[in-house]
Image (cartoon, helix red, strand yellow):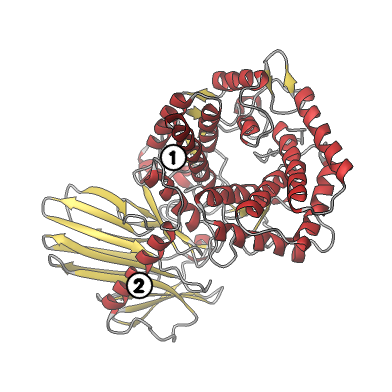
Amino acid sequence: MNKEESNYNPIANYGVIGNQNTIALVGMDGAIDFMCFPRFDSPSIFASILDKQKGGSFQIIPDLKDVDYKQQYLPETNVLVTRFLAYEGMVEITDFMPVKPLEGSCELIRKVTVIRGKVAFKMKCEPRFEYAREKGKAIAKDSGQVFFEDGEQAEFIRLVSDVQLTAGEHDATAEFELEEKESACFVLEAVNSEDETDEFGTDLNGKVHQLFTETVNYWKSWVGKSKYKGKWLDMVHRSALTLKLLTSHKYGAPVAAATFGLPEHIGGTRNWDYRFTWIRDAAFTMYAFIRLGYTAEAGHFMDWIRHQFDENMQDGSELQLMYGVDGRAELKEIELDHLEGYMHSTPVRIGNEAYDQLQMDIYGELMDSIYLYDKYGEPVTYNFWESLKRHIEYVCDNWRAKDHGIWEIRSEKREFLYSRVMCWVAVDRAIRLAEKRSFPYPFERWRNVRDEIYKNVYEDFWNDDLKAFVQYKGADVLDASALLMPLVRFISPYDPRWQTTMEAIEEKLATDSLVYRYNTEHDIDGLSSEEGTFSVCSFWYVECLCRGGQLEKARLFFEKMLSYGNHLGLFAEQIGLRGEQLGNFPQAFTHLGLISAAYAINRAIDVDES
């Protein structure tokens, strides 16, 4: 790592806080280096994780020498505590965001407390608007208030504190000193204008304490509704809390990750924007919520899906693979050339042109989640069923279509194994749901199509030389997405063809518990750079081991995967060659895979011990 790269914190060195409208990344050094405001897919106001000089950050720095850093969440919450430990003093920063129903209501609260000693501090808040295109203007209202104005967009942010603030041209600073047990508070909030009344008044500390108590109680109450009581409880609940943070309070739709532009390989070009709702990722998230007993979350997402059917597809258009959390369909991809990228990994992209791709698998994940919601949540209505039928008919007509696949290949379309398997899932779950609820459906047509897809997969995607199901029709390469075949009950984990496929994946894509999604050297995706192992594939692998009777190996590899999480139990998308976190962070796909694997192993252990 050269000197310029060392200026960037490792991705693993961050915790996250949020209010289900947006998320902020808080470093172990106490700096908030990433935040979009006031919504997940809003432009960033802090993005120094993507450009140390231009991105903007919110720093609180204690004057301590030889500091050790620690971070933890308060138990069963998303309230983050960062500690600075030194001989001359000990400091805590408590960071949280109150969860409020209004989308425009957004407050970032930071409370600094000296635990031991007498400590001097420097604070610097330098928001950069419109993805750091605009510096904005800082305006001092009084000694405890500074407004930041983005003139282009007429947006206002207010910083309130109980220590004296100084407004520069584009930032706010403070220098203050705290005795042992003393504290100082900082609140950054969205406002409509610089004339808006300060709701915190003279008792900022008291109001912050009230909001702190309400926020802690909110998260503890939510976790308390979990029905999971098995092993690895803390890790399962941390993953559930992370998924909840990534799910829009207003719309019920989860984003794939909180960030954009973080690289899948340092210096590489695989730097995508994941702040949108993928149908696939969202459906898998609902699986995880339903397994833990959170059917209300699944119901909220079903409302979002119904809205897509009713409002966005009246012209007969088909389901897109991703949308904005508010349901918007166009997600134009743009490169931010003015940002140097995390450790000089460019380009930094916002938007995602994959929204316009064809990915046939999304119907399978969606239909499976609807089937499970009908089983464990609320019954599907007849009107909703009629909307679903049109999409199943589309699958019946187009299941042979070439597409871009689960990994969003940016080269030629192919007949991908995973897409074909999930088309089978779509028709199979639709039949099961119709039979259970006695809904009318074209009995013979759907059953014939389901059987035809099954035979097609079993015969046309099998490579007799490799003794494995391959990535696409006619291929001689493997894909870790095949690991979902037994998990969606397409094939028995004891089927001889599956067992040799599993052996081939272990040989060619797995390194111990770490699994690559495919071999990038075969240039299947049209991108030249490398990537790390894909963490959700590792958890799929663990679950396959479990279901195939290799319980001890599954348990060992699951424990190993947990050790690759960061100090707070958070995972990005991928794991690099040195065990580092790579890609957007935290990633829903990884955390829902962790929950599913833990659930499967715990159930197998219970059966084994009974």
**Residue 502: x and y, percent?**
59, 22
Alpha carbon distance from label 1 to label 2: 32 Å
Q: Where is the N terminus found, in terms of image quarters?
A: top left
- Answer left or right for 510 relative to 84: right
Residue farthest to the front, as pictured = 610
Neighbourhood count class around disc 2 (C-alpha, 10 Å): few under 14, some 14–19, many 20 upward: some
Instruction: Please tell me which residue lies in front, 471 or 499.
Output: 499
Q: Where is the C terminus found, in terms of image quarters?
A: top left
**Residue 330: x and y, percent?**
70, 59
Q: Earlier in the sequence, mark 1 or mark 2?
A: 2
- Answer left or right for 178 relative to 340: left
**Vertical arrangement, residue 22 with respect to residue 571, above or below:** below
Q: Are marks 1 and 2 in contact (CB under 8 Å)?
A: no
**Residue at 52% across / 45% down in the picture?**
592
Identify the element where label 2 is drawn. Answer: helix
- Answer left or right for 467 relative to 111: right
Instruction: Please tell me which residue lies in front, 583 or 509.
Output: 509
Foreground mark, 1 or 2? 2
**Residue at 31% across / 77% down in the picture?**
207
- Label disc, if present, on residue 75 of the rendered structure: none
- Label disc, if present, on residue 581 of the rendered structure: 1
- Residue type indicated by callout 1: Gln
Instruction: Please tell me which residue lies in front, 548 or 562.
Output: 548
Instruction: Please tell me which residue lies in front, 242 or 411.
Output: 242
**Residue at 83% across / 39% down in the picture?**
447
**Residue 25: x and y, percent?**
41, 55
Neighbourhood count class around disc 1 (C-alpha, 10 Å): few under 14, some 14–19, many 20 upward: many
The quarter holding residue 24 reads bottom left
> What residue is disc 2 on?
211
**Residue at 66% across / 28% down in the picture?**
523
